[in-house]
Amino acid sequence: MAYGDTTRKAEAQGVAVASINVTHNSSVAGNLLVAGCSSFSGGSGTQDPITVTDGGNTWTHAGTAVNGTGSSAQAAGISVSVLGTGGNRTVNFNPASSNTHDFSAYTHEFTGPHATPVSGTAVEASAASGSTTADSGSFTPADADCLYVAVLGHTATGTVSENQSPGNTNWTLSNEHESGSSAEPGSMVFFIHSGSAAARRAVWSIPSSGWATVIAGFKPAGAAALPFPPLFHRKQVPLFVGRY
Amino acid sequence: MSILGQNPINQPTGTQVYGPVTVPNPFTQMIVRIARCTSAAPTMWPNAATEVDFFVEITLDGGATWLRLCGATSFGGIVIGKDSLEAPESTVSSPIPPGTGRRLRATVTVANGPFVSQITLEAT
């Protein structure tokens, strides 16, 4: 069963707050809710890992990229939930500390997830400052027909452009924020793949700044176990040899 | 465009609802701004232990039902922003669903109050 994009999504941006939440409406139980977040821990020290909750469903953290400490501390993360409970979900993004952060928070809902959807190991990348290209690096999931999601967080106001070479140029944009000098810019993109597991890469052009990216994959319902090699080769032989 | 400005507020520990206010029809985005403590405004939200949890809701049916949009939690005192300067405000923003006759309200819950600040709800 392949993933499907419900087109239901939500977004919010926060400045100088300890945590943020965004409400994703009309979700359907059984679907995959993806939560992407970019955050900046302004001058407070090491960037916090962020826990995603919604007061009812189980969330799995797929990956977080963290760049630096102090005034350039930037992070991007992805968490997912196969919704046991649908409806209007208030998705909370909670750092480990009460330090002040700037956030961009995104949600996007898809049909057709496997019960344990995370496939492979997320790839995390970052650069400290002065970059005009954010590159997730290449990621290959462990399964066929995966949903790929990539999240970017960076620190400067200005145009963010997805689908840049040498990355794949057929990502679908879920949401983005471009204001940054007193807010948190970032972007979340996705791609629904059909076929055997393949490498993908997300590259953005950004204003000169530090950045962090994470790319992860999620297998669909009915994903088969990895094929085992044949134990032996059988040579075809006739079933019957008549003798006259 | 500011559609709700509470200037100043002095909210004790507990929950207060601000609004509702009407959103002009063409507007698609909202932002809540809460003034923070700075060296220039030391009486605004000075206590780092004063926790403020705020969220915004919208009604598309004249108040019969309310849909939550977004929210945040923050603490008082002076904090340094991304630009290495004292952050003058805490904000949360999100798109507003389309419609006519829309109204917004902000709910603010204070712990370890009182909470002395300014709250502005803007739509663009």
Image (cartoon, helix red, strand yellow):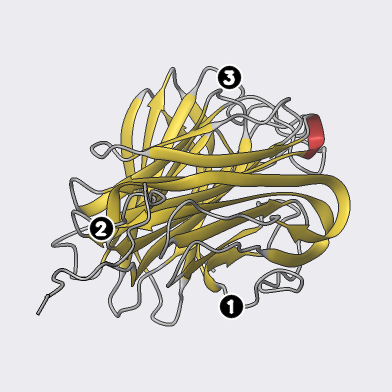
Residue B58, position as x, y percentages in the image: 30, 61
Q: Residue at x 12, y 75 (%)?
A: A243
The chain under label 2 reads A
Q: Residues within 10 Å of mark 1 (few under 14, many from 20)?
A: few
Residue picked out by circle 2: A222
Quadrant of residue A163 in the image? bottom right
Question: Looking at the picture, does residue A221 appear above or below residue B39?
Answer: below
Q: Nearer the viewer, residue A163 or A220?
A: A220
Residue under disc 3 on the same chain as residue under disc 2? no
Mark 2, secondary structure of its residue: loop
Between A217 and A203, the one lying in front of the other is A217
Q: CA distance from mark 2 to mark 1?
A: 25 Å
Are the residues under marks 1 and 3 on the same chain?
no
CA separation in Å, label 3 and label 2: 54 Å
Q: Which mark is residue A170?
A: 1
Chain ID at mark 1: A
Q: Which one is in front, A181 or A224?
A: A224
| Left or right: B42 in relation to A112 | right
Write the residue at 28% across / 76% down.
Answer: B101
Q: Quadrant of the N terminus of chain B?
A: bottom right
Apparent side of residue A83 relative to residue B37 in the rendered image (left or right): left
Which of the two discs, 2 and 1, labels the residue nearer the N terminus? 1
Amino acid type, mark 2: Gly
Which percent across, then down, holds residue A3? 33, 67
Percent x, y of residue A31: 26, 57
Q: For the residues labelled 1 and 3, say whether their Cβ atoms are less than 8 Å apart.
A: no
Dot label at residue B47: 3
Foreground disc of the pair 3, 2? 2
**Three-letter code for the amino acid on which mark 3 is drawn:** Asn
